[in-house]
């Protein structure tokens, strides 16, 4: 059996319950640890290993980025999938190690999800915006428009009130 066939076997047979509960958002989700636990029965059966590698980078505005790469290998070949997550150094109530740990956990989860084709679109963890879908900082939007950005790009990411849209439209000319 080729490595692609072994990976396809895991992708089609993979089952992992959402055993973690987010009391703030009131939803269940699965963690990287849950995903790894669910893959363990396949490792010996298919003769593969799964590892996760992480690299910290600084890309823009001095925001640290963690690049997590999940790798499946049969000892001769390997297939990998990557996820990139920013580290929120302004996260209230968290020390720097916790901020990096949180970003690392998300990166691992999504790298594994990409590798094993785990669809979390119905997962509240994937769809819960915690209020971030509404434009909170009009000044940043104004700066974005003044530097050549478009209202359409903002509207793809945020819901604008009619007053916000009117204010931004006047900047666009």
Image (spheres, rainbow, N blue to C red):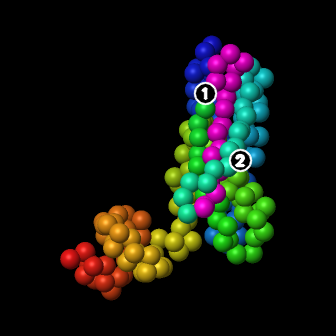
Q: Is residue 4 magenta?
A: no
- What residue is disc 2 on? 32
The residue that appears at 54% across and 45% down in the rendered structure is: 119
**What x and y, as percent, mark residue 48?**
72, 23
Image quadrant where residue 25 sits: bottom right
- Vertical comparison of 147 with 164: above or below: above
Question: How many angstroms separate mark 2 from mark 1 (CA)?
Answer: 18 Å
Question: Image check: 113 left or right of 137?
Answer: right
Q: Secondary structure at mark 2?
A: helix
- What residue is disc 1 on? 79
Magenta part of the protein: which range? 62-78
The residue that appears at 34% across and 72% down in the rendered structure is: 145
**What x and y, as percent, mark residue 131?**
53, 74
Image quadrant where residue 93 sits: bottom right
The residue that appears at 20% across and 77% down in the rendered structure is: 173
Name the residue nearer the viewer: 167 or 131.
167
Q: Main secondary structure of the magenta part?
A: strand
């Amino acid at each position: 059996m080729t490595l692609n066939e072994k990976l396809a076997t895991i992708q089609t047979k993979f089952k992992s319950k959402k055993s973690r509960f987010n009391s703030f958002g009131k939803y269940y989700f699965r963690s990287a640890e849950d995903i790894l636990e669910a893959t363990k029965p396949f490792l010996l059966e298919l003769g593969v290993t799964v590892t996760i590698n992480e690299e910290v980078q600084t890309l823009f505005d001095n925001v640290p980025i963690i690049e997590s790469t999940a790798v499946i290998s049969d000892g001769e070949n390997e297939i990998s999938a990557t996820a990139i997550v920013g580290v929120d150094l302004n996260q209230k109530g968290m020390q720097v190690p916790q901020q990096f740990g949180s970003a690392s956990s998300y990166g691992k989860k999504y790298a594994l999800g990409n590798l094993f084709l785990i669809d979390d679109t119905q997962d509240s963890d994937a769809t819960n915006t915690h209020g971030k879908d509404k434009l909170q900082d009009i000044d940043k939007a104004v700066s974005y428009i003044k530097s050549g950005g478009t209202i359409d790009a903002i509207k793809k990411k945020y819901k604008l009130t009619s007053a916000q849209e009117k204010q931004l439209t006047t900047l666009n000319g």
